[in-house]
Structures are given as structure tokens and as C-alpha cells.
Amino acid sequence: MVRKPVVSTISSGGYLQGNVNGKLPSLGGKEPPPGQEKVVLKKKITLLRGISIIIGTIIGAGIFISPKGVLQNTGSVGMSLIIWTVCGVLSLFGALSYAELGTSIKKSGGHYTYILEVFGPLPAFVRVWVELLIIRPAATAVISLAFGRYILEPFFIQCEIPELAIKLITAVGITVVMVLNSMSVSWSARIQIFLTFCKLTAILIIIVPGVMQLIKGQTQHFKDAFSGRDASIMGLPLAFYYGMYAYAGWFYLNFVTEEVENPEKTIPLAICISMAIVTTGYVLTNVAYFTTISAEELLLSNAVAVTFSERLLGNFSLAVPIFVALSCFGSMNGGVFAVSRLFYVASREGHLPEILSMIHVRKHTPLPAVIVLHPLAMIMLFSGDLYSLLNFLSFARWLFIGLAVAGLIYLRYKRPDMHRPFKVPLFIPALFSFTCLFMVALSLYSDPFSTGIGFIITLTGVPAYYLFIIWDKKPKWFRKVSDRITRTLQIILEVVPEEDCHKL
């Protein structure tokens, strides 16, 4: 079911060393005849598309629905705004670290690839194991549920939206995203650009009236901005956690590095521009909220943007849920586009079933790696409490991101002569990796039960690695069945190994 890794040991040049220009390895070993096109993922991610991927996946429902997590744990308006700003700067530090990693190791796959390069196959397998089985399907289902709820909001103004209706619309939304990413890279990227403009429009709909309120002198909620309930020692780190979660998504461009045009320039530029826009937008949006809503009212609201628009925008407030829904759809689209490449790369390295590393012969999309998410997301959608499940495993995201950035520091000393077109000061990855690992340690202390469950689920990746990857004496019948399933899926999906065949 899962083939042996293409490279089984770490060479002196690194686990993934050998394709220094970021070219994907040929599984067929033969060049196609002249005039016939290779079946590969093409470089179609321009600077604008790269910016849209980052902004489009960072800005989801959180900034529009519930920024109260930061306020709850800071105790004052002024401190909450400081936390939003600091989290933006810390996220920029992480993004800059990933810019160095992405321009030094020109491979798609993001966290998985960097952990594989630095720490070897076992931690990398555990990372992709948890991502495939739990984190990504659950995260897709959660953001999709927000999409379903807000797309129906204008039709159920006077009554509660039926849960079944939300889930059915959500299922349709997930299916549309999967089909879109299966059919065309170009169209997926174009729609992502459009949805990114919708997100920025939604933020401007909040910021502009907020600025007008400030001009009119509506500053009563900023008086004694640092007065209120004192933030506890445990509260401030938790506020950082909420803030960093809202900024999460800056790493998704690194998942598609091999499809980025001129990655040495595009990746750092896209990251810097995106983080500047998002951080400015987030801080100004929170300022706008406080021009109209007091801290006490914000803590009572489950949808801050809707509360704000109802008070300030009148009938136009009906447009806000639509923009929030489009924002969620953009996050769904960007997340599926990027994470499918993680599964594609992990399969190419032998850590997931071989079928996931195959490409459609005409559409040139990693079709199997995209659609594998669909049944898993549907199971999550119609199962239990998704938010608890995400809480169980949220620490794993920051643990592996922290490890990946710590790997940058390790590579500086282990491979000082490595080509680094973009290089950050060493204190940037050091501070960011320390922050990530501190949040992980804090979660173990503040919520040992939920985090412990997540830790146990993550550890199941270790026996799975030895069972599926290391153990090569599987029964012959198992191998035959696995090969037959792979060949059947190839025929049904019209996919081939990369460069194994040329375009018909």
C-alpha cells in the first residue's frame, strides 16, 4: 500500500539532496520524445497568485467572527491591540524563516519537507500522518461549516438556521473546492485571487466606517485603554495562542514551492507583502470594532463583524455574512490547494500510497492527492465535536512548525556553504521557534487532558511508520492487492507517475 522511500538514508548532502534546482525526480527514468510534453506540475504561481494564496488562507472566519479570545485573556482593549500587533510581527518572523527555507530547499511540502531534510524520515512521516488523518480533514470541515452557516445567514434572519441545512451546504462547498482543485491549477489560482479581493473588501467594509467613527470622535472605548481586568500570567500566553492561530496560513506558499515562478524572488516578496497587508488589516479591524462596540459587548458577541455591521451599516449589513462566507471559501480553496501538494510530495518520498504522487495526464493536477481529502473531510463533517478534535491536535501544528524553523538554525551550522538566496538574521528563527515550543509546553501545562490525547494520537504515527514504511516483508497477497488497487485507480482517474508518461 505504501512503497519504500525513494531515499532511505540521509546522505551527506541531506535527505532530499540531489535535485538542487528544485526539479522533481523522474520516476520513469526516461525523457519523452521531442515535441511531446512531460506530465509534471507546472510553474503557474506568479507573485500575485502567491500573495493571494497566503492572504487567502490566513484570512478566514476568525477576524470577522470571534477576536474575543485575545480580549478575554488580556483583560483590556490596549493590551489586546498590542497582542494583535506582536502576533503579526512574530508571524512575520516565522514567514521570513520559511522564506529562507523555501529558497534554500526548493521543494514543495512545507513543514514535511524541511523536517525530512533536517531530522529525517520518522518525524516527517509522523507530521504527514497526523495531517492526513485528522488535522487537515477536521480543519477543512470547521472552516467549511463557517462557510455554510454564513452563506445561509441572509435567508434565516428571523430564525435559527437548521443544522442539517448548514451541513448539506457545507458538503456542497467542500465538493466544489475539491472539483475546482482537481480540474485546473490556473482556475483555482484565479478564483483564489478573486476571493482574496473579496476578503480585503470585507475588511475595508469594517475599517473604513471605523476610521470615520474615529474622525467623528468616537474614542470613548479607547479611554483608559489599559484599565480593566488584569491579565494573568497564564492569560497572556493564551492570548498569543489565539492571535497566532488567527495569523496561521503564512506557510502555505512553501507547500507549492516547485510550482512558483522564480521562487528565489517570488517567495520572499509574496510573504513580506502578504504579512504587511494582513497585520495592518487585522490591527485596524480590531480598532474599528472598538469604535462602535465596547469591550464588554465584544465579549458577549459570537460574531463581532455582524454585530458591528448591524449597528453601523444598516441594511448593507446583510452583505457582511456573504463576504464572510466568501472569505471562508477562499481559506478552504487555498488550504486544499496547498496541502494536497504536501500529500503529493510525501507520496513521492514513499511515505504515503503511491497513487497520491500521480498526476492527471491532461489537466496536470495532483488529482489523487486532492480528492483523498474529500471522504475524510465528509467523515469529519458529519461526526462529533470538530472543535474539540482541533484542540486535541492544535499543539502538533506549532510543535512541527517550531521544529522546522529550528531546523533552519541547525542547517546554518551543519551546512554553512548551502546556497541561500534569501537569508534572515539568526535571532528571527531563534525567537520564533522558542515562541512555538513555549506555546506547546504551555498547552501541556494548561490543558493536560486535551493535549495529552493529541499527543497520543500523534504518537500513533510511530508504529504506523514501522508497519507501513520499514517492514518490507509484507505478504505477497498484500502486495498484489495493493498493486492491483493502484493500477485500477490509475485507469479510473487517468493519472500517471510524474514524467513517467508524456501528454497524449
Image (cartoon, rainbow, N blue to C red):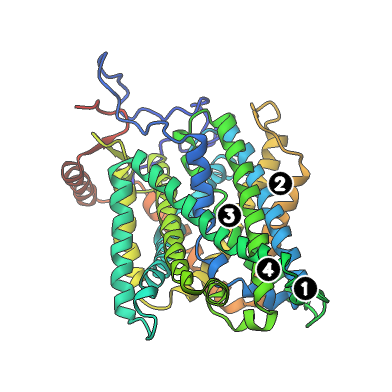
Q: Secondary structure at mark 4?
A: helix
Which residue position is annotated with label 2? 429
Q: Left of 65 or right of it: where is 223? A: right
Q: CA distance from mark 3 to mark 2?
A: 14 Å
Name the N-terminal-most of marks 2 and 1.
1
Which residue position is annotated with label 1? 222
Q: Secondary structure at mark 3?
A: helix
Tell me the number on the disc at residue 400. 3
Which residue position is annotated with label 4? 213
Q: Residue at x 56, y 33 (%)?
A: 266
Q: Left of 385 or right of it: where is 301? A: right
Q: Amino acid at mark 4?
A: Gln
Mark in the foreground, 4 or 1: 4
Mark in the foreground, 3 or 2: 2
Name the N-terminal-most of marks 4 and 1.
4
The residue carrying pointer 2 sits among few (fewer than 14), some (14 to 19) or many (20 or more) residues within 10 Å by Cα, namely: many
Kindly check if marks 2 and 4 are in contact, taking CB atoms under 8 A apart as contact.
Answer: no
